[in-house]
Image (tube, grey):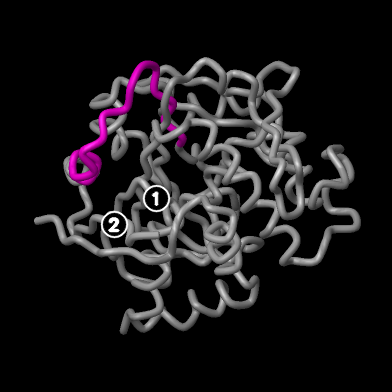
Amino acid sequence: MEKAKVYFTREISEDSVVKMYKALGKELIGKVAVKVHSGEKGNQNYLHPEFMRAMIEYVGGTVVECNTAYEGARNYTDKHRKLMEEHGWTKYFNVDIMDASGPDMKLDIPDGRVIKENFVGKNMVNYDSALVLSHFKGHPMGGYGGALKQLSIGFASTEGKVWIHSAGTNKDQNTLWDNLPLQDKFLEAMADAANSVHKYFNGNIAYINIMCNLSVDCDCCAVAEDPCMKDIGILSSLDPVALDQACIDLIYNSSDEGRDHFVERVERQNGKHIIDVSEMLGTGTKEYELINVD
């Protein structure tokens, strides 16, 4: 497989997000789903809608989210909608909580390593293309969160999230934390799910990772650590594997004093395993050309 193109700028601004999308030379067609992280109530690190506004308006997209599977302000539709309003998403955009009502949409994964089907919000069928806007950061379970996590856990319905976390043995959110699988099985299930969503959009999908507010914790944490590293920049690609690999490389090659703390979180959870497995599944390649965009 030839090297994927990954575009990079150190400038972090609303306009730079649009610039990095334009660098891809990809026009997303039809009705565009824009996957963001709405931010858990109490989280201080999530990227606010004002920062995403220029990009979402440029593609004329609908902000999409799915409910979570754990306690918090986003595990049921009425609570989630209220938080989306409190966080300002509904002020600027049409917002679609894709699993607000069932039944879920099922994506078959015949070549899945751990799971053979993925359950996503049923409203995903209404979209012709997708823009995955990811806040790249650490994660208490995945080690890190980027494009591949957005594709897997992000697009999954509540039951789908439990299905992935349990490596395909459970869909009951009331028993989410019971008998969790070995960490690598969880990461492999995420890779399977990510592959199914990437393939579903059949090339009509683009990815942007924003490397700022670099906490070891996810935007899903109500109580999260403050960022431990300085902001790095914005990256974009049509290949989510190459994109996440490039972000990980920028972390590992950094001389920032918080680098070791971030790397410890990634390695404690074997976070890079999802990248390796996603490449094996054919979602993308770890081989990339990093292209600076001025």
Q: Nearer the viewer, residue 109 or 83?
A: 109
Q: Residue furthest left?
A: 294
- Asked whether residue 267 is in view, the answer is yes
Q: Position of residue 176 (x, y in %)?
A: 83, 47
In the rendered image, residue 240, in percent from the top left (x then y), is placed at 43, 51
Left or right relative to 245: residue 232? left
Q: Nearer the viewer, residue 152 or 134?
A: 152
Image location (x, y in percent) of residue 215: 46, 64
Q: Amino acid at mark 1?
A: Asp
> Judging from the image, what secondary structure is the residue with disc 2 in?
strand
Q: Secondary structure at mark 1?
A: loop
Rendering quarter of residue 7? bottom left
Q: Residue at x 41, y 79 (%)?
A: 259
Q: Please tell me which residue lies in front, 184 or 36.
A: 184
What amino acid is found at the position of numbered circle 2 in the picture? Val
Q: Would you call the spot at circle 1 few (<14 residues within 10 Å), some (14-19), or many (20 or more)?
A: many
Rendered image: mark on residue 6: 2
Residue shown at 42%/72% (left/top)?
A: 228
Which percent across, then down, holds residue 92? Answer: 34, 22
Residue hosting label 1: 239
Residue at horizontal 31 percent and vertical 84 percent from the top? 255
| Mark-to-mark CA distance, 1 and 2 | 8 Å
Residue 72, label in figure: none
Q: Is residue 197 magenta?
A: no
**Magenta segment boundaries in residue numbering:** 20-35
